[in-house]
Image (cartoon, rainbow, N blue to C red):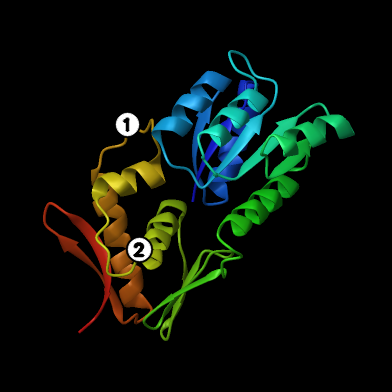
Amino acid sequence: MRLLLAEDERELADALAVILKHGHYSVDVVYNGQDALDYLEAQEYDGVILDVMMPKLDGLTVLKRIRRRQNAVPVLLLTARSGVDDRVEGLDSGANDYLPKPFDTRELLARIRAMTRQQTGGVDSLLRYGNLELDRLTFELTAPGGSVRLGNKEFQMMEMLMANPGQVLSVERFMERVWGYDSDTDAGVVWVNVSYLRKKLASIQADVQIRALRNQGYLLTEKE
């Protein structure tokens, strides 16, 4: 799941990015409202964490502009202003939730989970395909041969594959959704993580496989 974090306090932003990545999210970080708007216009995100008070454009202006453009991405507002009028203004501007500073990171993660669940209609935490299950809460992959916990990038790639079984996903799409808009990581990491996932699927006796299509990408299919 891919998030955009817009927060002008760089130390806080960088610390939150580490926490979110540890929670198996892919995160793009920007430090002002104009960059947040530019990223939202150019990329697709599963959720946005938007500080209200930022340089260039404030968070409420960014929020109002994306809503006028029919962008329904879930938005969580962060702000040091916690008055009722401030919360009402944020929610009336189109925010899905509002979290005053300072906050506990556990609550932040819980609110992100809640707003993204709402966006997907209360999606089940389990993805299933063939005899395979992927638990989005524990990051465990389970089949008749046992369970294995996935690393951050492995989990995000497996989640994409299991959410789109039989559909070819390009290397570029994996790079964009898992490694992020600004990543300078070599595309070879996709092949490396596919290799890890194949070994783990074999180790738990899954009846599905990750197939490669030359010059197209990868897809998840049941074994014949």
Q: Which mark is residue 21?
A: none
The residue at the far top in this view is 56
- Marks 1 and 2: in contact by CB < 8 Å? no
Which of the 4 image quadrants contains residue 117? bottom right
The residue at the far right in this view is 84
Look at the numbered disc 1 and give the secondary structure of its residue: loop
Q: Nearer the viewer, residue 52 or 18?
A: 52
Q: Is residue 79 visible?
A: yes
Whether residue 77 sits left or right of residue 147 in the image: it is: right
Q: Compared to 38, does 124 lie above or below?
A: below
Q: Amino acid at mark 2?
A: Leu
Residue count near mark 2 (Cα–Cα under 10 Å), binned few <14, some 14–19, many ≥20: many
Whether residue 104 sits left or right of residue 151 in the image: it is: right
Q: Nearer the viewer, residue 210 or 42?
A: 42
Q: Amino acid at mark 1?
A: Asp
Whether residue 66 sits left or right of residue 184 in the image: it is: right
- Find disc 2 in the rendering and name its residue: 161
- What residue is rendered at 86% in x and 31% in y? 85
Coordinates of residue 92 in the picture (x, y in percent): 73, 37
Real-space CA distance between mark 2 and mark 1, rounded to the nearest whole angstrom: 23 Å
Which of the 4 image quadrants contains residue 130? bottom left
Quarter of the figure with the C terminus: bottom left
Which of the 4 image quadrants contains residue 209? bottom left
Coordinates of residue 63 in the picture (x, y in percent): 61, 31
